[in-house]
Image: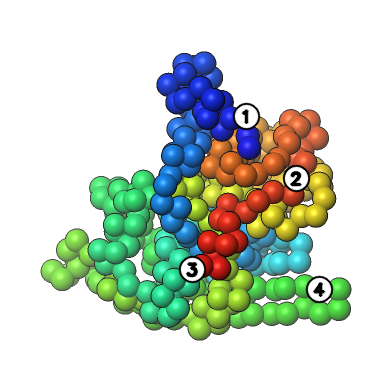
Amino acid sequence: MGEVHQLLMKHGLAEVRRSLAGDDKNARLCIEAAHAVLSDEHSQIGIAHAGFAMAALPHRRIQETVWERDGGPIKLLVESGLDSSRNPIGVPYGAIARMILLYLQTQAVKTRTRDVELGNSMNAWLTAMNISVGGKTYQVVREQARRISRCRLTFFNRTADHEYVSNGAFVRDAIFPIEHSASAQGRLWQEVVRLDESFYQSLLDHPLPLRDVAVAQISNRSMAIDIYIWLAYRLHALDRPINVTWAALRAQFGPGYKELRFFRRDMLPSLKLALSVYPEAQVVVDESKGLTLHPSAPPIPERRIAAR
């Protein structure tokens, strides 16, 4: 258990706020996030495809129409879809895109069907995840949903002897109301969306359980989401401690950074936030060398997964 979690359990939220937060905004976020996870009594489960632990979407809008992410044994290509005039729509990116995908994946695994109900259900879930679907956020959510529904995916899974290639998409069928039509008012999407069959089957074969309350605390920080998913995937599978250098972390989470020092500066706050929502994680941070990952319990106990 991390230091902030131990302090919260020993001294309580008010005292830790006074003694640790100060003027450090990220420290305050970490304290509140850690307290929310420790106080959670429901332990609702979310699901991500395990492949996203090694290869994720871009953090910001990109001009290219193909996004490539190489995570060692896993490589992901995301190709922008086209509109009816053959113009590229763009690759999905950022925290909102990740949250929409988490909802689709979680519901598909829980219901064991490719058809996922949206409408009020998704609005309620996004609100529970600290994303208010209104104002400027309305357009962001709609745009990312549109990009997700049109893009194409290629997963490469490499072993010593073979390379397995899976072609598909996130979504097979999706119909969006035309924005200027009367029926579109107040609607982001249709009531049901059907996931791509290949993606759905791969998701059932490789689900990664996460804690909903943890995701809710980091829902507006795309790098923190990626780090949390990566840690949830890696730590419980370790049989011994391993070292991960900052250079390796940059290749994983920030390949666009030319200088390592700037990547380290920007990653540290997201890393601390991700660790604050994963009390079971045993990770030692060395700001000059990198991370030491120790075998740790998963965020969702295996007995709870089996019960589901």
What separation in Å lies between label 2 and label 3 (alpha carbons)? 28 Å
Q: Secondary structure at mark 2?
A: strand
Residue hosting label 2: 293
Q: Quadrant of residue 123?
A: bottom left
> Of 27 and 98, which appears nearest the observer?
27
Q: Amino acid at mark 3?
A: Arg
Picture disc at residue 3 = 1
Locate residue 102, reporting x and y percent. Answer: 47, 61
Q: Looking at the picture, does residue 302 appear above or below residue 296?
A: below
Within-10-Å neighbours for mark 2: few <14, some 14–19, many 20+: many
What separation in Å lies between label 1 and label 2 (alpha carbons)? 16 Å
Q: Secondary structure at mark 4?
A: loop
Q: Amino acid at mark 2?
A: Leu
Pointer 2 or 3: first along the chain: 2
Pointer 1 or 2: first along the chain: 1
Q: Looking at the picture, does residue 281 appear above or below residue 54?
A: above
> Of 118 and 141, which appears nearest the observer?
118
Pointer 1 or 4: first along the chain: 1
Within-10-Å neighbours for mark 1: few <14, some 14–19, many 20+: few
Q: Looking at the picture, does residue 161 appear above or below residue 220?
A: below
Looking at the image, the residue that sits furthest to the right is 160
Residue hosting label 4: 159
Asked whether residue 295 appears in the rendered view, the answer is: yes
